[in-house]
Image (cartoon, rainbow, N blue to C red):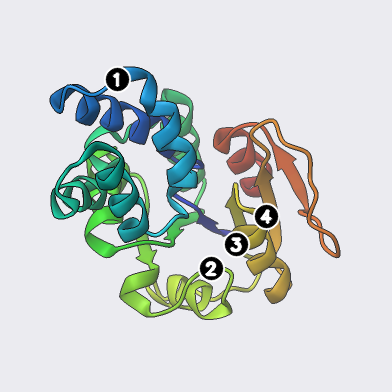
Amino acid sequence: MTLLLIDLDNTLIDRDAAFRRGTGIFLDAHGLPASDVDWVMELDDSGYTDRPTVASTVAARYGLDPEGVLAFLRKGAREHAVITPETRAALQAARAAGHRVVIVTNGLVDQQTGKIRNAGLDVLVDGWTVSEGVGAKKPAPAIFHAAAASIGASLDGAWVIGDRDDADIAGAHALGLSSVWIHLGRDWTLPGLAPTRTAATVAEAIGYAANL
């Protein structure tokens, strides 16, 4: 049995695509240019710009109520979160082979849990751990230990799968764990460490880690 610790945003789900859809709806509802979705996406930085900063910047640009913008942002991409058939099949195959899967994600509990449930991941994994809920963010070792403990497992032989070099792969490296980096068409640039494997999709990464 292998424990697979898998990232959520831009790994199990295409978070940026979901956020883009939500942003398009938001702009349309406020009569704002559809082309501005690219500006919002750049500002958002895949969710790594803190929500109050994004809200105040968007509100200032369009003369909107910052609290209203913040309410939209706190919903994030959860209403539009989906997984691909290939991702679903890979998760099912891994668990059918006896492996255990825990989602490990930075973010707010309500927001991230909403994405997990809306995408149907809640019935495809053994559990999930959100940084807000455990008081530690990737790459801190504590969040990975908490994820394993949440299902009564240890980190011995575990694999970490994710798209962030500075969070997922750096976290795995600090713990001496094997890892698969979802490259999303990028080159590896973080000095001093490297993933065990690289993959184009999470389904491919699960196949590597679970030896499917």
Q: Are marks 1 and 4 in contact (CB under 8 Å)?
A: no
Kindly check if marks 1 and 2 are in contact, taking CB atoms under 8 A apart as contact. Answer: no
Residue 162, how many percent across, how many down?
58, 50
| Contact, mark 2 vs mark 3 (Cβ under 8 Å) | yes
Whether tag 3 and tag 1 are in contact, CB under 8 A, the answer is no
Are the residues tagged 3 and 4 within 8 Å (C-beta)? yes
Q: Which mark is residue 33?
A: 1
Q: Classify mark 2: helix, strand or loop.
A: loop
Q: Is residue 161 left or right of residue 170?
A: left
Give residue 89's quadrant in the image. top left
Q: Is residue 159 visible?
A: no
Q: Is residue 25 above or below residue 174?
A: above
The reply, left or right, for residue 162 in relation to residue 17 is right
Say which residue label 2 marks: 138
Tell me which amino acid carries mark 4.
Asp
Q: Indicate which disc residue 165 carries.
A: 4
